[in-house]
Image (cartoon, rainbow, N blue to C red):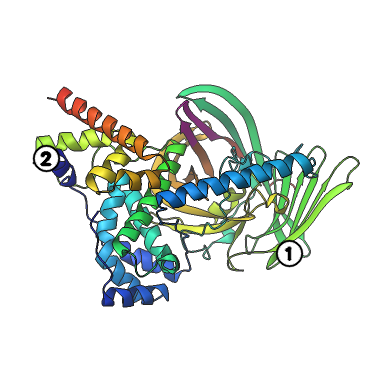
Amino acid sequence: MTWEDELRNLPIPDPPHELLARILASRAAGVRVVLPEATVASGRAQYLQYAAAIAVLVGFGWLALSTIKPSPVPHAGGPPIWSLDGMPLFPATVLGQEQLVRDVRPRYPLITTTAPSAVRAGQWTYEVRWITDGIFTSSRGRRTITRAASMHDGKPVWFMTESGYDTVLVDQASLRPLRYVRRMRRHLLIQEFGRDSVVEVFQGGDPPNERYFHGSAALPGLARSPLLVAWSPYSIDELVQALPLTRAWRGSVYSVNWLVYSDRVPVFTPVDLRVISTDRITVPAGTFDCWKLEVRDGFEKALIWVSKDRRWVVMRQRIWSDESGEWRIESLLVAVDTTPPAP
Amino acid sequence: MSAAGPSGGRGASVEAARAGSPEALAALYREHGPALFRLAYRLTGTREDAEDVVHDVFVGLPEALGRYEERGNLVGWLNRVTARVALMRLRSRNRRGEVALDAGGLGGAPPQDADRIALQSAVNALPDPLRVVLVLTEIEGYSHAEAAELLGISAGASRVRLNRAMRRLRKTLEDGR
């Protein structure tokens, strides 16, 4: 028997019996996946494509040198590097390192079953640390999120803020945001959410309002599904308190990004959550029996540990690596104050 | 690569799947799913990733079939789509530095004789760029030009990677004796 034969005969497990049922259930739930092209270009066609691409690049280069002026969109204080439940992130799409992915669909059925009454007020403090190649390298300080009960337009809402960087008002009944405000050094972003649309005003410049952006977009998904605010750190913390987590639980929810950066970051990104295991972990705030969840935001992935009894996010973790090393960013629960803070 | 031309029945089920028929999609899965799972498993090295790859391929298939031309080879087309999805997943996994839970062995596979276990371990120990070329060319039967096109590298680079993969395999197996 040759090597190739031996390689081909290596045992492979069979696909699980329930895989077809999962596929059909996903289709029935409206999940869609955009598959990559599978055409193979012929050698001659490839050369023609390369030549055409070079010609286009040269043309654009010439146009850029001769016509493009500095961008009117202010960058100072621009999109924060905090995303996906408060994990610091180098948004590759923002930096132009990767092709913008616009057609990502939810992997799981949209979340429609929640227990909004399980959400509690309080203050949660996290220590953020950066670990390179397994060696603790730096602390990124502490961040405190506050959730308080309040009223807005006659509706009970959750008022949430993270170290004063931003504020979100979330409808207590539907867990959908009503208003998001982020103050930056020289800019102010306000998103107002309706039942089926979001309107955004981005004020910038010095003096303020000299340059601004105004836009709106129809909201995706179901009107009865919760919605996350993508750039609001810890936006997901509130949602997980209301989720009926079990061993095989999975569900998706849309997060809403900034419209002003829609040319670089998709406005709506499905966030796919899946319980992958249970785990007992110890953090500065204590030892907790947790659900370990995979949180997938587009093609990026993070892990969060949610305490089974309190429903607090106890730890979150994101790992990157390339040929030069590995980086792990962790956020650990340090302290909790469940005294309802003043609105 | 093995090739099978579209038959009349297959053409009908492709058409029905394209129109969104769950029964036709299930029929396509029963016919091609296990082979695509094997391809995905060989490329990703884990059962979980292979499941996700096949899940994504079949969930996206009805819409993707709009791009499939009937005169083409369905098996080859499905293989290329699956390989691309698996490679995307592999790159994404590598970017995150994720280590698969069953990466240490072919999880779930029945234990075989010592030589086979050693060969499995040696294949799994190969870096992804080398293992992928090995799987595509030596196991799946892709030409270097086809593998290179899928991987976004030159055919020469594909040959070099295969050569390195084989050398590493030999060394690992010889060291293990």
Given the image, on which type of amino acid does mark 2 rest?
Answer: Thr
- SS category of the residue bearing label 2: loop
Q: Are marks 2 and 1 in contact (CB under 8 Å)?
A: no
| Secondary structure, magenta segment, majority class | strand
State the image coordinates of residue A34 (x, y, percent, origin top left). 48, 60
Residue A213 rendering spot, x and y as whole percentages: 80, 52
Q: Quadrant of residue A267?
A: bottom right
Residue B121 horizontal side relative to residue A208, left or right: left
x and y, in percent, of residue A233 in the image = 63, 44
Instruction: Count residues near mark 1 (Cα–Cα under 10 Å), then give few for <14, some for 14-19, many for 20+.
Output: few
Q: Which residues are magenta?
A: A319-332
Mark closest to the chain's N terminus, 2 or 1: 2
Up-down: is B165 above or below A22? above
Is A242 within the magenta? Answer: no
Amino acid type at mark 1:
Lys
Measured Cα–Cα span from mark 2 to mark 1: 73 Å
Res. A309 in view: no
In depth, the one of B116 and B145 nearer the eye is B145
Location of mark 1 (residue): A155
Output the chain of dot 1.
A
What mark, if any, has residue A2 been given in the picture?
2
Left or right placement of residue A111 versus residue A208 in this view: left
